[in-house]
Image: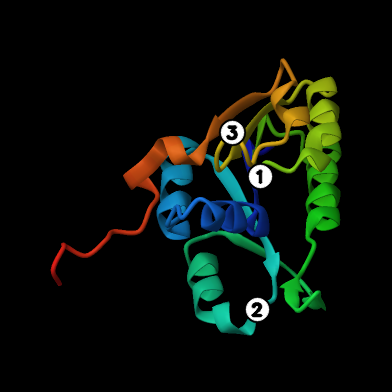
Amino acid sequence: MLKTVIDIDAANIILSAQNLDFDLDIFKLIRHLKDSYRSAHIIYFTGNFKSKEAEFRALADAGVEMVYKEIFNESNKAKANCDVEIAHRMTSDILLDAPERIVLISGDGDFACLCDFAHAKGIAVKVMAVDPVSCSRVIKQRAFTRVSFLIELGALITKEKPPAGT
């Protein structure tokens, strides 16, 4: 049995961080998650962007399980829509592996029913969204779901800025 499963909705947190001009460093976030949840299995759901191949390989080398989705264009934007893959994997983990805790890195309200399902099966649920605005009201209203925000971690998970004047 896994103690903690961490599911990262890459599109949700990357776009939410960009909207805030929050310079998220995914490798620092992974390191923080590994330090905070020592026995965690981290799963990163993303579109299969060829331009990110080296980054994805580095994440896999760091022990992160990568789950890729085919990319399509919608309104001249590349999209992958990994929600179904996340939902399928979370459901499988809840039913088959029964971890003690699930940490969902996303503010997407579509996952509220999965939080309910995990809770009903006796699994603790924590949601980490980028900020309160990018976290669905539906998620925040779940009394049993602990919610925190990545912006509160600040320099622990952001890219270092070069000194002024360089």
Q: Residue furthest top?
A: 143
Q: Which residue is mark 3?
A: 132
Q: Which residue is mark 2?
A: 49
Label 1: few (<14), some (14–19) or many (≥20) C-alpha neighbours in 10 Å? many
Sequence-wise, the earlier of marks 3 and 1 is 1
Q: Decide which of 89, 75 is in the foreground and name it.
A: 75
Q: Secondary structure at mark 1?
A: loop
- Which residue shows up at 61% across the image and 28% down it? 147
Indicate the secondary structure of the residue bearing disc 3: loop
Which residue lies under the disc numbered 1?
106
The amino acid type, in three-letter code, at marker 3 is: Pro
- Amino acid type at circle 2 is Phe
- Residue 24: x and y in percent read 45, 55
- Vertical side of 32 occupied by 78: above or below: below
Q: Position of residue 163 (x, y in %)?
A: 16, 62
Looking at the image, which residue is at 56% across and 77% down? 52
Give the x, y percent position of residue 95.
86, 37
Precedes in sequence: disc 2 or disc 1: 2
Left or right: residue 22 compared with residue 83 = left
Q: Nearer the viewer, mark 3 or mark 1?
A: 3
Residue drawn 56% across the image and 72% down it: 56
Cα gap from disc 3 to disc 1, whole angstroms: 11 Å
Q: Secondary structure at mark 2?
A: loop
**Label 3 close to label 1 by CB (< 8 Å):** no
Res. 15 image quadrant: bottom right
Quarter of the image for the C terminus: give it.
bottom left
